Amino acid sequence: MYDEHGAAADPETERVCWGLSIGAAGMLSQMRGLSDAVGLRFEEKRTRLRRMSSWLPMSIVPRARWAFRGGELLDAVNPPRLVIACGRHGVIPLICFKRLWGERVFTVFIQHPRVELSNFDLVLAPEHDGLTGSNVISTRGALHHINREVLESARETELAAKLAGGTRPLVAVLLGGPNRYYGFTARDAFRLIDSLRNAVQRDGARLLVIPSRRTPRQICSMFSTAFGAPHLVWEGEGANPYLAALAVCDHVVVTGDSVSMTTEATATGRPVHVAHLKERIPARRFRRFHESFERAGLTRAFDGRLPTWKYVPPDDTAAVAARIRERIGSPCQS
């Protein structure tokens, strides 16, 4: 492959994928998971709209390097073959990459970009977004990096063995945090704690509570106070038990504010119970997502009980990766 100056592409960059975003955990999980599934080495690149640009509707933000932080990435002599972006702050950088490098770069945007879809080679959006187009692939939930191999590897760790060595059933409790649609207030936390206490009393459950970056300290403290030994509330010290917990748990309880965490939980094939939070504004997209997963038999609403059921873990990431491998093996159609 050659660039517009006739220079040969660097074989090393052919094996690399760049991921453009502000660095949020859910975004990184989607981009890294897709890169791994394609078979490329993932490199995180931080981009952020400058203040003036961030106030504008995405449709009128200037398609220029000065509109975002991270514009020096456009100076790459040999760009990677695949560039993925996720979230609002990755839209303009990805458009600039495509305009500068053309067919040298295959661009993939994850989520609804809120701009013309023709700016990208491929757009990946969850079904609940209702996005359609000739270059759009709809996924059931969020893409991610968790699959059978990842879980098997996590299951072999010393941490997983330590977590598994206790009473059953073991319930991984995944906590999100406030966002635009959900406040995740102290009242929400009290309600979830009460439901979890019911599960402990009814089913003898042992809890492993894992907060996320978005979980307020006050909420973490409430769970630490509510659940002592034999339960465990991870408070951010030592290795993150997230993967190990998913690998060895019998059930997952996840707060409904995160599409990414809910989708990742279903990679386990274990019963996934969604603890729905009170909406601060109408969360229609979240409702459509949760309804679709419930209809598919992947999740159920958490009510303090722990019924069991079986399902085939969805793996949209592998299917999308196969489509991308087909495309990057030949000149991109933009």
Image: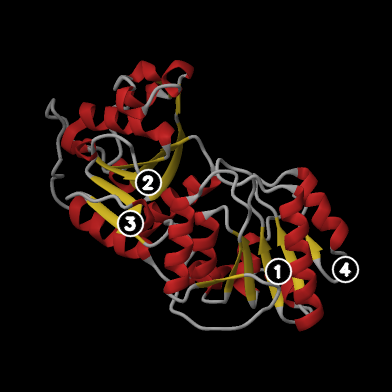
Q: Position of residue 192 (x, y in %)?
A: 73, 62
Find disc 4 in the rendering and name its residue: 229
Q: Position of residue 146 (x, y in %)?
A: 49, 63
Find disc 3 in the rendering and name its residue: 38
Q: Which mark is on residue 172?
A: none
Indicate which label's residue lies in the foreground, 2 or 4: 2
Element class at badge 4: loop
The residues bearing labels 1 and 4 have C-alpha atoms spaced at a distance of: 20 Å
Element class at badge 3: helix
Find disc 1 in the rendering and name its residue: 158
Element class at badge 1: helix
Q: Which amino acid is tagged 4?
A: Ala
Indicate which label's residue lies in the foreground, 4 or 3: 4
Q: Which amino acid is tagged 1?
A: Glu
Element class at badge 2: loop
The residues bearing labels 3 and 1 have C-alpha atoms spaced at a distance of: 29 Å
